[in-house]
Amino acid sequence: MIVAGGSGFIGSHLCEALLNRGYRVLDLDDHSTGRVSNVAHLLDVDGFTLLEGDVTDGGIAGRVAAVVGDETVAAVAHLASAASPPAYLARPLETLAVGSIGTDRLISIALRYEARFLLASTSEVYGDPLEHPQRETYWGNVNPIGERSVYDEAKRFAEALTAAHERASGLDARIARIFNTYGPRMQPDDGRVVTNFVHQALRGEAMTVYGDGTQTRSFCFVSDEVEGLIALLESEVRGPVNLGNPTEFTMIELAVAVGEVIGVEPRLDHRPLPSDDPKVRQPDISRARELLGWEPRVALRDGLRLMVDSLDDTAASGADH
Ligand code: UDP
């Protein structure tokens, strides 16, 4: 199994779960946003290999071939991309390249090994949605030239390329639309709302709420997300599948939950709303429920507790972030 972006937040949890299921895993990551420390505990695990490389690089297929040799490859999972808004806004051209050129190169690798291809797509393909909750049949409402378009349109193009290869090249593809996911190993400075609120509350600071805080998101704990990804990968389900937790919260409700879990009175510091920030987001997961028999199990407060406990463990062990 090749996991592009395997040193990232979701990618590293996926590598670990795949190894536990008996797969051999090649983590292909350029460590532009992923970190070696996310997979440091896997480096000595039998069956795990780390290859530092950029999926947009013209020589990447050759470098992968040199490592894989004549082994069979069950699947190529494409999770390589900056994913948090501050991270992709800081790398606009790289983000467009990884979704387009990178996807093309990874599909070529999958075709060469007759491997299944799993595309990690995103709820961002729905943009600022006019349909709520979002079903896979909804085509989305994306500003094609807005700041966020570098991520949204790259992922939409990646879906288009994947679907075209399914039709034209017989690619055996799976498309996961991943909704907001949180948990251990999120980078403290990734700028996402859960990370910001948790670290701000732990430092006794006010939580930075963008806009009036009535915008909504639906937060999926990472172990649930990874179970969904593996269920999809091992299924025969074609076409996009939403994978997320359907319980929706406003950002103010999230701040209250974080305050409760950490045991502090939530104080809010309102800041300007970023451009094109979606007002609502909630997955309709009927397809995943019916076709994969999957649904999230970890409630928000339980997941936040697990995340906060993991930070305590990291601090106690003096580990490097
Ligand atoms: N947000 C916030 N405070 C923060 C960071 C984000 O209120 O410190 C808001 C952001 O404007 C958005 C939501 O939280 O409405 C989720 O943002 P995030 O960056 O986590 O992910 P997105 O779903 O926008 O990709």
Image: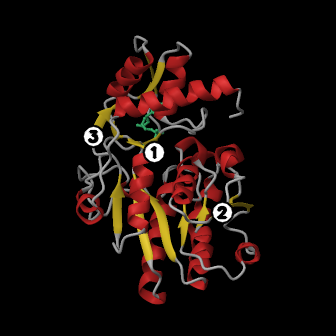
Which residue is drawn at the image coordinates 42% and 13% (left, top)? 263
Q: Amino acid at mark 3?
A: Thr
Task: Decide if residue 85 is on the left or right side of residue 239.
Answer: right
Which residue in the protein does label 1 denote? 222
Q: Residues within 10 Å of mark 1 (few under 14, many from 20)?
A: many
User: Relative to 115, is 180 above or below?
Assistant: above
Query: Which colouring convention does the figure follow?
Result: secondary structure
Sequence-first tag of 2 and 1: 2
| Quadrant position of ligand 1 | top left
Q: Residue 73: x, y in percent?
A: 59, 76
CA–CA distance in space, label 3 to label 1? 15 Å
Q: Residue 247: x, y in percent?
A: 27, 40
User: Relative to 184, is 149 above or below?
Assistant: below
Q: Amino acid at mark 1?
A: Val
Q: Residue 256: x, y in percent?
A: 35, 21
**Front-most of residues 36 and 145:** 36
Q: Is mark 1 within 8 Å of ligand 1?
A: no
Task: Decide if residue 310 is on the left or right side of residue 288.
Answer: right
Which quadrant would the C terminus be assigned to in this image? Answer: top right
- Report if the CB atoms under discs 2 and 1 are less than 8 Å apart: no
Which residue in the protein does label 2 denote? 47
Q: Amino acid at mark 2?
A: Gly
